[in-house]
Amino acid sequence: MKCDMKTMMKTALGLGVVVAVAYATMPAARGWIAAGAPFLFLLICPLMMFFMMKGMHSCDKDQRAEKNQADKAPTTPLVGHSPLKD
């Protein structure tokens, strides 16, 4: 996941839409939504960083698995090349 200004702005816009829809459709919770919305917007950057780091760890596991499979693949020595001469 790429965490840059464009991604954070898209997330903020999406969060704004969610807050607006929740505010319009749940009149009983309007006070809680109005009180919590500024806090949620302040959390956009740390939340994006958290999800980005989670995404990086899952990619790292995939890369380690691919590397382990590549390491187990048999290699053929070069013709006329002795590994002891290096």
Image (spheres, rainbow, N blue to C red):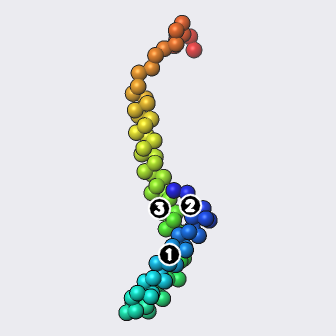
Q: Secondary structure at mark 1?
A: helix
Q: Amino acid at mark 2?
A: Cys
Residue located beneath label 2 in the image: 3
The disc, 3 or 2, on the residue closer to the chain's N-terminal end is 2
Q: Residue at x 57, y 14 (%)?
A: 86
Residue at image mark 3: 51
Q: Tag 2, which secondary structure? A: loop
Packing grade of label 3 (10 A; few <14, some 14-19, many >=20) is some
- Residue shown at 44% from the left, 92% from the top: 31
Q: Which residue is mark 1?
A: 15
Q: Residues within 10 Å of mark 1 (few under 14, many from 20)?
A: some
Q: Are marks 3 and 2 in contact (CB under 8 Å)?
A: yes
Residue pictured at 44% horizontal, 35% vertical: 67
Q: Position of residue 85 (x, y in %)?
A: 56, 10
Q: What is the crowding at mark 2: few (fewer than 14 residues within 10 Å), some, or many (at least 20)? A: few
* Image coordinates for residue 79, horizontal then vertical, percent: 52, 9
Q: Is residue 75 above or below residue 34?
A: above
